[in-house]
Structures are given as structure tokens and as C-alpha cells.
């Protein structure tokens, strides 16, 4: 009878501990989900503001686990952009080049 009562008490304690653990895990999941949703909301506000102002986002936006950060060390594009180089023309025997066409146009 003593062994039975001791075993029942142990089972009740284990059950209580397991229920407490599951409650803590459930609370942690809710907190983590809320924090992640808040980070996504922050990021969407930044994106919405830039869309409404029609401006580019130069800094890198990151969501790392539960944190939203703006990394100013990583730039999405170079400001001002580098100048565009003139296109290189492929020289072929069966086609006129641009300078040849311009010369012909001047002659006509």
C-alpha cells in the first residue's frame, strides 16, 4: 500500500510538472509569435513609408528571428550610380558598323 501511495504521489507530481512545463511552452510560443509579428509590422511600416514617398531603400532590411534591423553597412545600390559605358559593337563582315552607317548617312 505504501509503494502504491508513493507511486501515485510521484505520478501526480510528474503530471503537475508536465502541465506547468506545457503552460510555460505555450506562453513562450505566444510571446515569440507576437514578437515576430511586431518585427514584420515594423518592416512593413518602413516599406509602406518608402512606397508612399516613392523613394528607394538603400539600406538592407533584415528580420533575424524576432528582431527587425536596418543594416546601414550594407547598401542595395551605389549612390550616385556609375556612368553607363557606351555599348561595344560586334564587328562582322556581313553588317555595316555604326560609324559606316553614319558616314553613309552623311554622304546621302
Image (cartoon, rainbow, N blue to C red):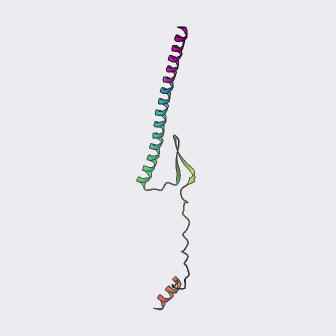
Between 44 and 79, the one nearer to me in the picture: 44
Image coordinates of residue 69 in percent, x first then y, are: 53, 45
- Please identify the residue farthest to the top as the structure is shown: 1
Q: Residue furthest left?
A: 52
Q: Is residue 59 above or below residue 14?
A: below
Q: How many marks?
A: 0
Residue shown at the point (47%, 30%) measured from the top left:
26
- Of 78 and 13, which appears nearest the observer? 13
Judge from the rendering whether residue 108 lies leftward or rightward of residue 85; answer left or right. Answer: left
* Most common secondary structure along the magenta stretch: helix
Q: Name the spot of residue 76 as percent of width and height, x first.
A: 53, 56
Q: Does the stretch in magenta take in 26?
A: no
Q: Residue at x 51, y 17 (%)?
A: 11
Viewer-nearest residue: 85 or 55: 85
Residue positioned most to the bottom: 107
Q: Quadrant of the C terminus?
A: bottom left
Q: Position of residue 17 (x, y in %)?
A: 52, 21
Q: Residue at x 51, y 88 (%)?
A: 103
Residue lying at the far right of the rendered structure: 73
Q: Which residues are magenta?
A: 1-18
Is 80 in front, or is 18?
18
Q: Is residue 2 magenta?
A: yes
Amino acid at each position: 500500500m505504501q509503494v502504491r501511495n508513493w507511486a501515485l504521489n510521484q505520478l501526480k507530481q510528474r503530471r503537475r510538472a508536465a502541465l506547468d512545463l506545457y503552460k510555460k511552452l505555450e506562453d513562450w510560443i505566444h510571446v515569440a509569435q507576437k514578437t515576430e509579428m511586431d518585427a514584420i509590422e515594423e518592416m512593413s511600416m518602413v516599406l509602406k513609408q518608402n512606397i508612399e514617398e516613392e523613394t528607394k531603400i538603400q539600406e538592407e532590411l533584415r528580420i533575424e528571428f524576432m528582431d527587425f534591423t536596418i543594416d546601414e553597412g550594407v547598401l542595395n545600390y551605389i549612390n550616385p550610380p556609375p556612368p553607363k559605358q557606351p555599348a561595344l559593337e560586334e564587328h562582322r563582315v556581313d553588317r555595316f558598323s555604326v560609324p559606316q552607317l553614319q558616314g553613309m548617312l552623311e554622304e546621302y
